[in-house]
Image: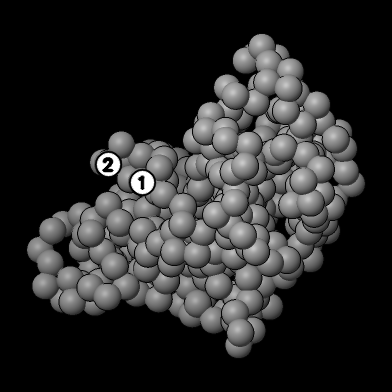
């Protein structure tokens, strides 16, 4: 009787696991059928996602997508980039036009709970900053009492500015505009003293200006703003895989692995943690049907997080790593355990 009950229990567990995978893997199955990962990115933001002179998309967000494509297909070239605007980025994901969103999008409670979307991982920690004209001789946000800001009407940026001004007990005036390009044009024309956005966009605005030395990015942050990967609800398997593809970048940096040295280290290392991560002693991708070498291929083809950051916002926008450093160096980046 005990053998019968044990066998029946094992059968039920197996059937439950099979049913769970069949129900949960719809997006991952579709991605595999399509033969590519469709990634929502910006329409063009230097250092983050922008086509180069040859039409090849470059930048931090595009490399995140490539890491996911390597995990699924073993080939970074299987990432297809779909430009999305601030207005279309979430609807493109909801409608199924894209499989994941990796662009300058703040991770919020509403986006994680009300829109049929899932935030899988935070991969870039930044905040809402302030860009001013150098001629104002302002070096700190505390000097902005009485300043005028160009901002998007009824936006989160405008609301954060108002909250920040009340908290700091300073007076500011907001001049509303409909679109980011109109805000930037008005600011460059001198119609306002300052603009506010996440530090990535402000760094891009400054570097793209005809006279970047005439603009000053203030050191203070108005509000925190983590960015990350979003997917549709309904497929926890796909959500988990995208999360761990990003974790592979984190873990590679923590272990000192790069695209240049990972192949050699894989041949010589006796470190049990590195051997496990690179798929030499066990397959950490069994649950998704991935080969044991999938994390190795992510590092070999895309690199570590440090490489992704340095050749994107670091090199192009001149951004410091700041909070985007490993936890071992006092930063916010920490992978879950590879076991």
Please name the residue that numbered disc 2 is placed on.
329
Residue drawn at x 84%, y 52% as measured from the top left: 182
Decide if residue 225 is in sight here: no
Residue drawn at x 26%, y 64% as measured from the top left: 257
Q: Nearer the viewer, residue 111 or 6?
A: 111
Count residues near mark 1 (Cα–Cα under 10 Å), then give few for <14, some for 14-19, many for 20+: many
Q: Quadrant of residue 307?
A: bottom left
Secondary structure at badge 1 equals: loop
What is the number of the mark on residue 333? Answer: none
Where is residue 128 drawn, in percent x and y?
A: 62, 37
User: What distance separates the C-alpha of mark 2 from that of mark 1?
Assistant: 6 Å
Left or right? Give the position of 294 relative to 129. left
Query: Which colour scheme appears in the figure?
Result: one colour
Where is residue 242 drawn, in percent x and y?
A: 53, 57
Residue 130 in the image: above or below residue 161: below
Residue drawn at x 27%, y 41% as measured from the top left: 329
Residue drawn at x 72%, y 46% as measured from the top left: 117
Q: Quadrant of residue 306?
A: bottom left
Circles 2 and 1: CB atoms closer than 8 Å: yes
Please name the residue that numbered disc 1 is placed on.
325
Where is residue 18 drawn, in percent x and y?
A: 57, 56
Q: Quadrant of residue 99?
A: bottom right
Q: Nearer the viewer, residue 298 or 5?
A: 298
Q: Nearer the viewer, residue 106 or 99?
A: 106
Q: Nearer the viewer, residue 57 or 144?
A: 144
Count residues near mark 2 (Cα–Cα under 10 Å), then give few for <14, some for 14-19, many for 20+: few
Where is residue 231 drawn, in percent x and y?
A: 66, 53
Left or right? Give the position of 284 relative to 98. left
Secondary structure at badge 2 equals: helix
């Amino acid at each position: 009787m005990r053998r019968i009950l044990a066998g029946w229990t094992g059968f039920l567990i197996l059937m439950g696991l099979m049913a769970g995978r069949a129900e949960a893997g719809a997006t991952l199955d579709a991605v595999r059928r399509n033969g590519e990962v469709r990634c929502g990115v910006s329409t063009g933001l230097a250092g983050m996602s922008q086509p180069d002179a040859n039409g090849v998309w470059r930048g931090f967000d595009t490399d995140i997508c490539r890491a996911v494509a390597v995990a699924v297909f073993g080939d970074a070239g299987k990432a297809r980039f779909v430009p999305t605007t601030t207005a279309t980025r979430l609807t493109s994901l909801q409608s199924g036009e894209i499989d994941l969103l990796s662009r300058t999008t703040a991770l919020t409670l509403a986006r994680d709970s009300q829109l049929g979307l899932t935030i899988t991982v935070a991969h870039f920690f930044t905040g809402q900053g302030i860009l001013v004209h150098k001629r104002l001789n302002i070096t700190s946000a505390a000097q902005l009492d009485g300043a005028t800001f160009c901002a998007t009407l009824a936006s989160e940026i405008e609301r954060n500015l108002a909250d920040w001004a009340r908290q700091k007990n300073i007076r500011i005036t907001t001049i509303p505009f409909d679109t980011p390009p109109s805000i930037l044009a008005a600011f460059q024309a001198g119609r306002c003293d300052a603009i506010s956005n996440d530090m990535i966009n402000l760094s891009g605005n400054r570097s793209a200006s005809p006279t970047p030395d005439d603009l000053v990015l203030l050191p203070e942050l108005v509000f925190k703003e983590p960015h990350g990967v979003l997917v549709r609800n309904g497929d926890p398997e796909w959500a988990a895989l995208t999360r761990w593809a990003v974790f592979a970048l984190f873990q590679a940096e923590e272990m000192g692995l790069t695209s240049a040295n990972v192949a050699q280290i894989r041949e010589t290392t006796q470190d049990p943690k590195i051997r496990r991560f690179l798929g030499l002693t066990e397959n950490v991708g069994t649950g998704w049907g991935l080969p044991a070498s999938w994390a190795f291929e992510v590092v070999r083809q895309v690199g570590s997080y440090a490489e992704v950051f340095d050749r994107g916002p670091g090199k192009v926008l001149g951004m410091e790593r700041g909070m985007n450093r490993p936890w071992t160096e006092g930063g916010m980046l920490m992978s879950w355990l590879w076991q």
